[in-house]
Image (cartoon, rainbow, N blue to C red):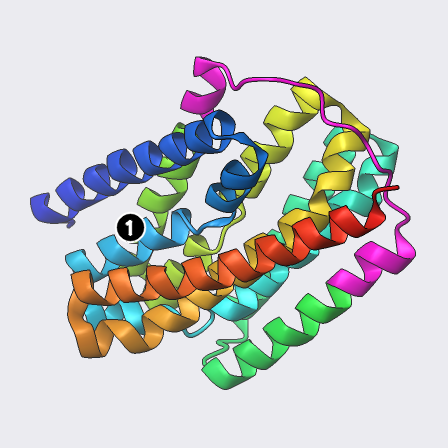
Amino acid sequence: MLSGALWLNIVCAFGVGGTWIALATLAADRFGARIGGFVGSLPSTAVVAFFFIGLNQSPAQAAEATTVFPLIMGFTGLFLVCFAALARKGFAVGLTGALAMWLVLSSLTVILRVNSFAGAVACYLVILVCSHLVMTRCLHLPSATQRKKEYTVPQILLRGLFGGSIIALAVFMSKTGGPVFGGLFAAFPAVFTSTLIINYRSQGLDFVRSMTRSMLVTGMITVGIYGMAVRYTYPYYGLIGGTILAYLISMVSAGFTFWFIRGKKDQTRP
């Protein structure tokens, strides 16, 4: 039977995680393309998920939950590739197929009991490179111009509720199913999914297919690096110090990746 303290942590994880993601969405919308793009590339779901796993259990258990995290982040990159490829037949087809692919691969990770961090990192790097090559050289994604827009309150709340639910599920599954499940749900593409849905409704299919390229680079690298940093910062610096240090490391990587993407865009301008 689950204790009252666990339920309290799950509720807090939902509230804090949902609020964090909603505020990040609002910041990305309010501060313009450059600052907004940087804020939008920072990790959110994984930060709160690992923090509450560590709070509910221990920093060591949260660090253990990162064992499969890089591999699952690789699957999240494949999620974007799969969506971009299948969405040519419609948004619903692309999103459904991408989520199904992610769930199948993640389930195989659990069934096969993958427990090698080094192997997970190696697979993550291979998938990252291959996904980027497929995105840039094979899919021929459209270049779509973004229409001026602002997120509505319901859209921000939807994103916060969705992200908060996944974070709460990660905390719950880590306690009941073990660290592997915690790491798995911490890498669930909740923010990617909500971003695609919201921008599809406001910008159209061509735009959301084109934005998967930048989402692949910023999301996979910054969030992946955050999870890897947690594995080493939590045991040595504790929950709060480890979270701050890991987040600072991910911010540096986010700055480099965002600069790289902006540089690419500037080079393609006439």
* Magenta-drawn stretch contains 138: yes
Q: Residue at x 36, y 31 (%)?
A: 23
Residue underneath mark 1: 172
Location of residue 146 (image quadrant) = top right
What amino acid is at disc 1?
Answer: Phe
Residues 68 and 240: in front is: 240
Residue 53 vs 196, above or below: the answer is below
Residue 165 vs 180, above or below: the answer is above
**Residue 157: percent from the left, percent from the top?**
41, 22
Residue 133 shows in this picture: yes
Residues 29 and 73: in front is: 29
* Magenta-drawn stretch contains 266: no
Quarter that holds the C terminus: top right
Residue 195 vs 235, above or below: the answer is above
Q: Most extreme residue toward the front, as rendered? A: 270
Residue 58 shows in this picture: no
How many numbered circles does the render carry?
Answer: 1
**Residue 143: percent from the left, percent from the top?**
84, 37
Q: Residue at x 32, y 40 (%)?
A: 17
Helix, strand or loop at label 1? It is helix
Residue 91 vs 67, above or below: the answer is above
Q: Residue at x 14, y 41 (%)?
A: 8
**Residue 133: percent from the left, percent from the top?**
81, 64
Is 133 left, or right, of 35 in this rendering? right
Is 231 left, or right, of 207 in this rendering? left
Q: Residue at x 25, y 43 (%)?
A: 13
Q: Which residues are magenta?
A: 132-158
